[in-house]
Amino acid sequence: MTLKALMLGCAAAAMATVAFADEDAVLSIEGETMVTQAAAPAHMENVDTVYSGWTFRTPETQALQLDDFDNPAFVFVDQALELYETADGTAGKSCMDCHANVADFAGLKTSLPRVEDGELVTMTNLVNECRTERMGAEPWKYSGGQMSAMTALLAHQSRGMPMDVTIDGDAAPFWEKGKELYYTRVGQLDMSCSNCHEDNYGVMIRADHLSQGQINGFPTYRLKNAKINTTHGRFKGCMKNIRATPFKEGSPEFKALELYVASRSTGLSVESPSVRN
Amino acid sequence: MKSYVYGIAFACAASVVHAGETAPTAVQFDEYGAVPVSLTGVAGDPANGRKVFANRKQGNCLACHQNAELAEQSFHGQVGPALDGVASRWEEGDLRGIVANSKMMFEGTIMPAFYVDAGYTRPLEKFDGKTILSAQQVEDLVAYLLTLTD
């Protein structure tokens, strides 16, 4: 290798270090400071520090999350609060009839997905279980507008609390499956989640600043499509980008992947509903 | 009309191996992962290669590589090395091998293989059994890369 090639190699390597607009930027929402950087959980062998997706965004996008009045997601959260109070289904009940105070859902998002009776369940599953089993109502579409808004409202109750999913015991086989999916290359572009979000976070891929793909801010409002986006919806979009046939939203694969990715967010504050590009 | 016919031919290019072209499965890589022989026998067109390089639905090389020669295009990626002066560092066969299937030279690289049509997991149906670029697009791209000297 010539000295010149060596120097070019070094320049490229130097560029690959994490570059934030402002590494010391603090996310403080309504006076509450969020943890946007944390020591990576022990199970992450290749990463020392986990970073919220917020840290990778431009100052303009970051600013939209500092005040709930500026955060466009709250239009949808307010709509969900109306749904929350509205009776639906043959039992004539609303969410509020059983869960008088929505704030009681504080902590739920930090623990999901989790295993119940041998099955891995997401917040979406829990909402639909309530609708079909207790309300006598039709289930909502997995990533439809009503479900996205409702899960944003419920996740919001945990804002500021650290992500903390269980990965051992009953959850272990689901977590292992999710991990395997995370590292499996798929699609015509033949890439795994890790190729971008573990090996190359912090660098630009064309106009996008690659994040770690953390989901502590989900459901999230994306400027790209001006609506609430779910984790499974985002997984689907990523898979299409690499020209892979996505798994279905709510599928065992995406639920397992959600558990694994949530475990990579351990220690980061729930920011739901966050704002991303 | 002429451009219409050209458009049809172009749209099909990535899925059809033309007479005289090397099929994706028949590409001969040497022990270093280089492909010394042209895939088509037709000289590459660097002007078209420049378009292939930038086009998001073709090479989209700018997604990951900076290239000062395409300064008029905004947003150059940083995932791979900058390609300024790449022809002063690599031989033609190396560049062809890297574009066709860089995994033959760099094990485990993130870089997609642009002339491989099989062996993918869960490819979207419309890309199943197809290469990202046609053989001639690979040749055009290599011809363009060869113009990027120090």
Image (cartoon, coloured by chain):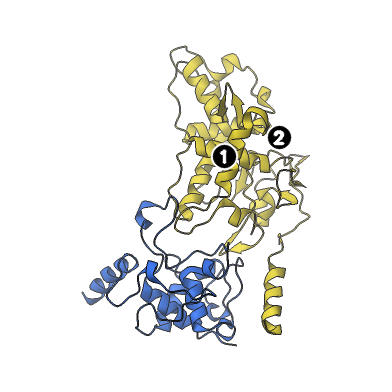
What is the residue that sits farthest to the bottom in this orientation?
B150
- Which picture quadrant has residue B74? bottom right
In the image, farthest residue toward the top:
A91
Instruction: Give the mark nearest the N terminus, 2 or 1.
Output: 2
Residue found 58% across the figure and 73% down from its top:
B66
Q: Rounded to the nearest whole Å, what is the CA distance between mark 2 and mark 1?
A: 19 Å
User: Observer-nearest residue: A73 or A115?
Assistant: A115
Q: Is residue A43 visible?
A: yes
> Comparing marks 2 and 1, which lies closer to the viewer?
1
Percent across and percent down for residue A122 are: 56, 31
Q: Chain A is shown in which shade?
A: yellow
Seen in the picture, residue B128 relative to B17 is either above or below; the reply is above
Amino acid at circle 2:
Asp
Q: Chain of mark 2?
A: A
Side of A268 where A275 appears, left or right: left
Farthest residue toward the front?
A: B31
For label 2, the residue is A164
Q: Are marks 2 and 1 on the same chain?
A: yes
**Chain at tag 1:** A
The hue used for chain B is blue
* Mark 2 crowdedness (10 Å alpha carbons): few <14, some 14-19, many ≥20: many
Q: Which residue is mark 1?
A: A177
> What type is the residue that disc 1 sits on?
Lys
- For numbered disc 1, what is the local secondary structure? helix
